[in-house]
Amino acid sequence: MPGAIVEFGIALGGSATALATRRGDRSFHGFDVFGQIPAPDAAKDGERAVRRYAVIAAGQSRGIRGDDYYGYMTDLQQRVTATMGEHGVTVDGRHVALHRGLFDETWPTVADRIPAIAVAHIDCDWHDPVAYCLAAIAPKVQPGGIVVLDDYLDYEGCRAAVDEFLGDHPEFVRRHLDGNLSLRRV
């Protein structure tokens, strides 16, 4: 199937590295603020998301196994690039590219260079960025293409955005995959 691999929300780059390592001759485009995530919308995302963000904003969040939380790192994009390099993936801006900034600012600058999407991974927690990503990539996802949604079972805003999207896009069907939700374009 033709198409790029895209990821929205990279964190430390684990899934980005795995996706880019297995991309074959496809391009990989990763999008992230490479810093602290924006605040959720309390009305759309609910109390759990608001509480989680309060911990992050207060500088009290811990990372995996008690390490520093990635959102506080000033060199996060460089760390992701280094991690990818350690696994044989060169971030060259053409075959493998990382785009820094808010999704609604960065996606429009490269969308024309990505005519088709085979696989997308959306890991951005809150309603509005999930809704934006789904709407932005939907026309480009190829029949048989997969969209993995990391936070569907964790945050009500993500769940609402996905359910709203599915209500408007019958060409996508839901599949559950290892505790995450994936959508397949039919």
Image: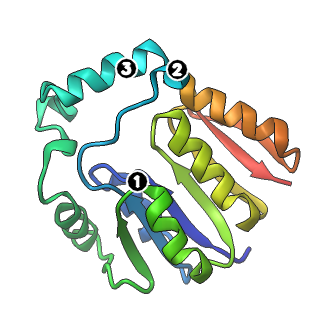
Distance in Å between CA atoms under marks 3 and 1: 25 Å
Residue at 42 percent across and 64 percent down: it is 30
Place of residue 176 in the rendered image (x, y in percent of width and height, measured from the top left): 67, 33
Place of residue 56 in the rendered image (x, y in percent of width and height, measured from the top left): 22, 29
Going from N to C along the chain, the mark reached first, 2 or 3, is 2
Residue 74 falls in which quadrant of the image?
bottom left
Residue 57 falls in which quadrant of the image?
top left
Residue 157 left/right relative to 163: left
Q: Nearer the viewer, residue 140 or 181?
A: 140
User: As shown in the figure, which amino acid type bears the numbered disc 3?
Assistant: Val
Mark nearer the viewer, 2 or 3: 2
Provide the residue designation for mark 3.
Answer: 50
Residue at 87 percent across and 50 percent down: it is 171
Q: Quadrant of the C terminus?
A: bottom right
Q: Nearer the viewer, residue 65 or 117?
A: 117
User: As shown in the figure, which amino acid type bears the numbered disc 2?
Assistant: Ala
Provide the residue designation for mark 1.
Answer: 15
Provide the residue designation for mark 2.
Answer: 43
User: As shown in the figure, which amino acid type bears the numbered disc 1?
Assistant: Ser
Mark 2 burial class by Cα count in 10 Å: few <14, some 14-19, many 20+: few
- Does dot 2 land on a helix, a strand or a loop? helix
Q: Is residue 141 visible?
A: no
